[in-house]
Image: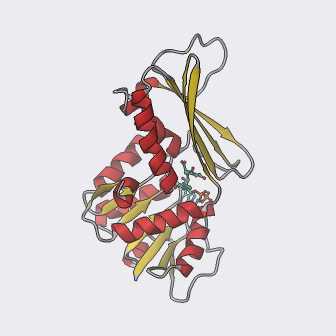
Amino acid sequence: MVNVGIVGSTGRVGTLLIDDLALDQEAKLSACHVFDKLTKSVPEGTVVTNSMKELLNSCDVVIDFSAPTATQSLLEEVIENGGKPLVIATTGFNKHQQNLLIEASKIVPILYATNMSLGVAVLNKLVALASKALREFDCEIVEQHHRYKVDSPSGTALTLAENAAKARDLDLDAVRVSGRDGEIGARTKDEIGVMSLRGGDIVGRHTVGLYNDGEFIELNHTATSRNTFSKGAIKASKWLVNQEPGLYSINDCLGL
Ligand SMILES: NC(=O)C1=CN([C@@H]2O[C@H](COP(=O)(O)OP(=O)(O)OC[C@H]3O[C@@H](n4cnc5c(N)ncnc54)[C@H](OP(=O)(O)O)[C@@H]3O)[C@@H](O)[C@H]2O)C=CC1
Ligand SMILES: O=C(O)C1=N[C@H](C(=O)O)C[C@H](O)C1
């Protein structure tokens, strides 16, 4: 049985993780990190703590769906005192936090995925293929999420854009456009638009469009349930506990 600790246990995905772990045959909840108090009941004996150290000492693997500052504390604890394998799903990291992730992966195995769904893992492959094969087509990405999402563009949209750019030997930072307003001039050849829409309860919808004169392709993934993410992360956690230190992607876990 794999003992799982959760960072972000009071959140939209964190609370689903608690439910999904209660039904799992091979993994169970052993610890929850909280800032104030847990809003859900958890199995007797579950450690509920506001200390990252205690969380890490109370599990075999951590699943993190929280916020960049919380993930940063987790990574700093691992870098300073060692830790356990980490499945990181939080998005919106700055450069410093991305570097901490790389540092910590020299100490423990880390699987980082901006999207834990199988569908998006396959979409990333399709996007790389299409972006390269359709080099002359304009690439534009639109992501749609619920009204509460705090980061933009979504982590998934940025990963899709990175794959599209890499397939064309482009540096995403140099070609990404995430807003258009006013007299901005005509679209440049290599730019990759990554735009956000927020509203209602949309779980997550990503469309990668490749547009040319006379034809276009749109590749779309829509998550209809947040359990897609919690279940994907639990699957990843069971795989990660058997890995050596290093930085892994969801493709490594899924064998894609
Ligand atoms: N990779 C993937 O497949 C997916 C990734 N995500 C990402 O996961 C993250 C969480 O999403 P979601 O569950 O919707 O978000 P919520 O806002 O519902 O939950 C966030 C959780 O993190 C905690 N938290 C928030 N701010 C801080 C802070 N400054 N320090 C410590 N803890 C904090 C919250 O605790 P409290 O309740 O006490 O505020 C809460 O438990 C986001 O970054 C989102 O983009 C989401 C879905 C899928
Ligand atoms: O915040 C969310 O809800 C989601 N965040 C992830 C992202 O930023 O890509 C994944 C998913 O789309 C839901």
Compared to residue 37, the image places residue 180 above or below, namely above
Compared to residue 203, the image places residue 178 above or below, namely above
- Colour scheme of the picture: secondary structure
Using the rendered view, name the quadrant where residue 151 is placed: top right
Determine if residue 233 is in view.
Answer: yes
Using the rendered view, name the quadrant where residue 166 is placed: top left
The quarter of the rendered structure image containing the N terminus is bottom left
| Relative side of 147 to 21, left or right | right
Nearer-the-camera pick, 30 or 167: 167
Give the residue drawn at x 40%, y 77%.
59
Give the residue drawn at x 31%, y 54%.
247
Q: Position of residue 180 (x, y in %)?
A: 62, 22
| Relative side of 149 to 193, left or right | right
| Relative side of 138 to 87, left or right | right
State the count of labels.
0
Compared to residue 28, the image places residue 236 above or below, namely above
Q: Position of residue 214 (x, y in %)?
A: 58, 18
Using the rendered view, name the quadrant where residue 235 is placed: bottom left
Q: Position of residue 244 (x, y in %)?
A: 24, 64
Q: Residue furthest right?
A: 200
Q: Residue furthest bottom?
A: 44
Give the residue drawn at x 51%, y 74%.
32
Give the residue drawn at x 56%, y 74%.
20
Q: Position of residue 65 (x, y in %)?
A: 52, 60
